[in-house]
Image (spheres, coloured by chain):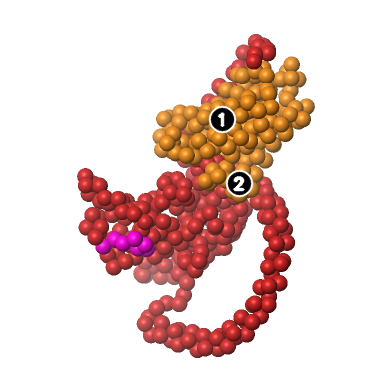
Amino acid sequence: MIRSIVLSTIILVACSLAQSTWFGGIAIFGVVPDVGLVVLIWISYRNGLVEGPVCGFLSGLAEDFLSSSPLGFHAFIRTAVAASASLLHGIFFVDKLLLPVALGVAGTLAKAVAAGALHLLFGSAVHVYSLTDRTLWIEAAYNGLISPIIFLVLTPLSRFLVTDRGRR
Amino acid sequence: MPVTRPKAEGRGRRAVAPILLAASLLCLTVSTRSLEGVPESLGLSLLGFFQRGFSSVGAFVADTVASIAELHKLRDDYTELTEKLERYTNMERGLADLREENKRLKEQLGFSQDIAYERIASRIVAKDPENLYSTITIDKGIGDGIRKNMPVIAFQDGLEGLVGRVVEVGRGTSKIVPLYDSKSFVAARFSTASRTEGLVGGQGSPDYPLLMRFVTKQAKDALQFGDLVSTTGYDSIYPPEVAIGRVRKVRILEYQTSIDVELDPVLDFSRLEYVFVIKPDVSAQQTPGDGAAGEPSK
C-alpha cells in the first residue's frame, strides 16, 4: 500500500509540475487540462477508500505550494474528489471510452462543487468557479477528452499503482 | 453495468478521507489567517527546485526544435543584416552627436539621469497549475534579493508596463500575482491632462479587461478610447508612472457616483517571458532630514 501511495503521489506531483511549466502551449482559451485530477480519479477508482484520498491530500498540498491558493485549498479539493471516486470502486466496468469521459467530466464538476463549498466557508480568501464562466466548462470538456488516453496509459502501470486489495 | 459490489470496508479505512479533509480545512484555516506565509514559502522553496528543472527541460526541447527552423531563417537574415549594419554605422555617427546634445539639454532642465530603482531581471519559469488562480513563477528568489511585495514590470514593444507584485519568495523561485488577478489592486491615474485617479483591479483572467473603479463622473467627458493609465505610486508598492493599460470602454451607471473604465493591459501577458523585479530605493524613501545611515543625529 505504501509503495502504491508513494509512486502515485510522485506521479501526481510530476503532473502538477508539468501543468505549471509545459502546458501553456496546449491551453484552450487560457484553460489547461487538469491531468493530475484525472490521474487521481483513476487511482482512487482503482484502489478504494484509502490510497486515493491520501494521494489526493499529499499531491494537493504540493499543488498549494506551487499555486497562490491558500494552503489546504487543493488538498481539500483533491481529497474530496478522490474520496468521491473511491466510493465508486468496483461498481462499474471500466470501458475504454464512456466511463473515463464521464469520470473526467464529473470529477471536474466535483472539484468545482468542493471549491464552492470552501468559498462558502472561507469567503473571498478562496477562488471559486463561476457557472456562467467558460473556464469551468472548457476544463470539464478538456478533462473528459483526455481521460480515455490517460486511463489507457495508466492501465499497464496497475501493477505498481494499484494495491492487491484494489485488484480484487 | 454493475459487476461487483464493494466489499465492506473497515471502519479505519472509511475514516481516512474525513480525517484528511479535516486536515485540509485546518491548513486552510491557518493559512487564510496568515502565518506570515512560512509554510507556503518552505513548500515553494522545495518544489520550486523541481519546477525550475521541469521548465528547463521544456525550454531545452522547445529551443532545440525552434533552433532547427531558425537556422534557415538565420542565413537570409545574415545577408540582410550585413547590409543594414553598413547603413546603421553611418547613422550612429549622427546619433552620438544627438545623444550628447540631449544629455546637455536634460541637465539644463534639471532632469536626473540616475535610475530611481534597481531592477532584477528574471525569467518566467511556470504559471499556476490551476485554472482558478493566476500566479506567475520566476527563476529568482530570496538569494537574488527578491522580497515580498516588490513590484514587477516588463518591457514589450518598446513600452514599460506593470506586471504585478511578488507575493511569495522561495530560495530560488518567487511567485508573482499579476495585474489581472481578481485580488490585485493598483492606485492609478490617467496620463492625460485630466490626471483623474482610480483603482485598477483584475477580473481573474488575462482574457478579460482590467477594470478601473472609483473614477469620478466629471472625468467621463475627458476620457477617450486609447488614453493611457499609469500608476500613481500612492500605495507604496508600485513606483509612479508605470503604464498599466489603455481605455477600452467606459461604463456609466446612473445610480453610481463614479464610473468604471475597462482597460486593455499594455502588456500581452501571454507573450511575457522575462520580467524585472524592482528593488525599492531605500534612499528615496528617507525623509530629507534623515541623513545618511550611521550618521549621528543632532
> Is residue A160 in view?
no
Q: Amino acid at mark 1?
A: Val
The vertical placement of A67 against B16, above or below, is: below
Whether residue B235 sits left or right of residue A41 in the image: it is left
Q: What amino acid is found at the position of numbered circle 2 in the picture?
A: Ile
| Chain B, colour shown | red
| Tag 2 and tag 1, C-beta contact below 8 Å | no
Q: Colour of chain A?
A: orange
Mark 2, residue position:
A26
Q: Position of residue A88 (x, y in %)?
A: 61, 19
Q: Identify the residue shown where x is 39% and y is 67%.
A: B290
Q: Earlier in the sequence, mark 2 or mark 1?
A: 2
Residue with the mark numbered 1: A105
In the image, what residue occupies the spot 71% across and 57% down? B65
Helix, strand or loop at mark 1 = helix
Residue B268 is marked as none
Is B163 situated above or below B12?
below
Left or right: residue B34 versus residue A26 is: left
Q: Position of residue B99 (x, y in %)?
A: 49, 84
Residue B176 seen: yes
Instruction: Residue at 72% x, 34% y: name it.
Output: A153
Asked whether B225 falls inside the magenta stretch, the response is yes
Q: Quadrant of the N terminus of chain A?
A: top right
Classed neighbour count for the residue bearing mark 2: other residues with Cα under 10 Å, few (<14), some (14–19), many (≥20): few
Q: Chain of mark 2?
A: A
The dominant secondary structure in magenta is loop
Distance between mark 2 and mark 1 Cα atoms? 18 Å
The residue nearer to you, when weighing A56 against B146, is A56
Q: Foreground residue, A84 or B26?
A: A84
Tell me which segment is drawn in magenta: B222-229
